[in-house]
Amino acid sequence: MTDTHDTNLPEKPVELEEEKKAAEVSEPATTETPAEEIVSEKPVEPVQKLTKEEILAKLKEVVADVENVAKPEIDGLKQSFYKLHNAEQDAARKLFIENGGAAENFVPQTDCVEEEFKNIMSVIKEKRSALTAELEKQKEMNLQVKLSIIEELKELVESPDDANKSYTEFKKLQQQWNEVKLVPQAKVNELWKNYQLYVEKFYDLLKLNNEFREYDFKKNLEIKTHLCEAAEKLADEADVVSAFHQLQKLHQEFRDTGPVAKELRDEIWARFKAASTTVNRRHQQHFEALKEVEQHNLDQKTVICEIIEAIDYKELTNFASWESKTQEVIALQNKWKTIGFAPQKMNVKIFERFRKACDEFFRKKGEFFKSLKEGMNENLEKKRALCEKAESLKDSTDWKATADELTKLQKEWKTIGPVAKKYSDAVWKRFISACDYFFEQKNKATSSQRSVEQENLEKKKAIIEKLNAIDDQMDTEEATQLVRDLMKEWNDIGHVPFKEKDRIYKQYHSQVDKLFERFNISVSNKKLSNFKSTISSIQEGSPQALYREREKLVRAFDNMKNELQTYENNLGFLTTSSKKGNSLLTEINRKVEKLKADIELVKEKIKVVDENIKNQG
């Protein structure tokens, strides 16, 4: 048989060439790399909106079917669980610090759910380790099988029998080779090269006619066309990660399939490569987009950290400012919870930074409120002391003095800082109740007093009218007596409204002064009359004012007596032998008489004061 098919054989192994091209497209994977090992290098996509208990339930399902669950799914469940767990711990730590505890003294409570989670994860880890060991064992067995197949191919190639007769055996060995999958990674390339070497040698030796060769190429073309179609459909697969994994399997089948006719090799490979490029590009774009989202999340979380770290604690000097800032921090914490994961290498670091900033804020807040609480306790004692003072004054009938004292206490109250909220209303009610009680009693007492004061005002106006009506033609003694009677009547009248006091007093004294001058009434009587009016004004002040006025008069009386004694003693040494001595004697006698008159006036004033004190009592 002529070797007619030799001219159609490739210059180098076809499958080796196509494998090289396939490797250029399928960058993330190699022939013998398990899908789960490829995926584990990619970012973990977390499980969203599950409770800790729901995560436990899913992990229990994983335990029952661990060999069919990918590692990223387990990692996603683990990350979601600890995100929830850490959020709970952070909330507990925050509450601990707000209640006055130091951050470094916080000890998390034992979480039974976490303990169960750890136990389940331990079981999963053990099962996965066992599966991995079993897989490695299987890979070694597969290696031996494929080495055996290569040896059989070698025997076929080196056999002196007609290669045409060995064709069926050759196809059988190819089928066996394709059925055996994973082998140890370190042996993949060497094993593949040896296999391809003997496959090509067999084709070189094969003395098939063109019909057999074309049939073989046709079958291989059908298989590779089907693989191209499957790869092209993956472009419409919604799950780009799943599409990528399926593509790796298609690549394995493509390279395990024999060659096609030489003129179709580039075309069929270009088609498969184009479909692969589309899937790989979508896969790459997916993770680039995921990385962009994660970087954006990191940027947002970094800004939140910077905002909390930049808080100026010197400006937080009172409850309101701390409360306002606390609401801001809580809002930032809530915002943090809505942001997804940062890049894996930064996720833990940024969270630790965030937690440290929050811990620092709530630690300082705890310190502030601890000192504030101490200050509030002091303020409470001060306010209770004011309550006791107010309660001791509330029954007093010394209206003006007590009103002044209570007003002073109210001003002092305003200077005292806040007290704890649970005491604030009660202590204020106690204080204001005492004040209100006094002023209510004062108003009741002074309301009737005001009507009396109005009557007194009308009486004093009537006296002024009577003083105005005294005729210049009236007898001096009669006029003097009338003035004195009206003055006595004036002094006997009680208080007038406070706002009218000065005006009516000026009208009265103006008219009295005119009458004293008109009828030449003695200066002493005028002074005594004026003093009686003055005493009425003094009475309207503190009750102690009358006693102070009496003490002043008594001191004046004693001083005048001493001065009079001195002048009288000096008179014994003076003579009238000289003009100068006579003049000095006259001056001293004048002063003595004036002193005697003043002493008498002071005596009368003391009597007036005593009468008023007696009437007041």
Image (tube, rainbow, N blue to C red):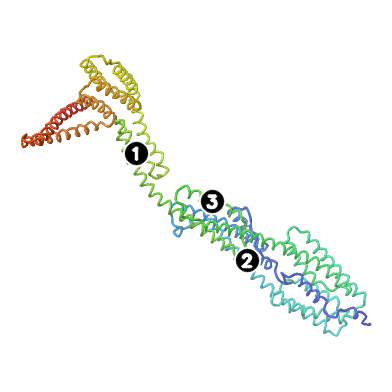
Circle count: 3
Q: Amino acid at mark 3?
A: Glu
Closest to the camera, between mark 2 and mark 3, is 3
Q: Amino acid at mark 1?
A: Leu
Residue 463: x percent and y percent?
29, 18
Q: Is residue 550 above or below residue 191?
A: above
Label at residue 82 = none
Which residue corresponds to mark 1?
Answer: 409
- Nearest the viewer among 127 and 214 is 214
Disc 2/disc 3 C-alpha distance (Å): 46 Å
Quadrant housing residue 454: top left
Q: Is residue 275 above or below residue 524?
A: below
Residue 611: x percent and y percent?
20, 25
Badge 1 local density, few (<14 within 10 Å), some, or many (20+)?
some
- Between discs 1 and 2, the one toward the N terminus: 2
Residue 248: x percent and y percent?
75, 67
SS for dot 2: helix
SS for dot 1: helix
Disc 1/disc 3 C-alpha distance (Å): 39 Å
Q: Is residue 510 above or below residue 199?
A: above
Which residue corresponds to mark 2?
Answer: 128
- Nearest the viewer among 36 and 144 is 36
Label at residue 328 = 3
Q: Is residue 592 above or below residue 267?
A: above
- Nearest the viewer among 119 and 305 is 305
- Between discs 2 and 3, the one toward the N terminus: 2
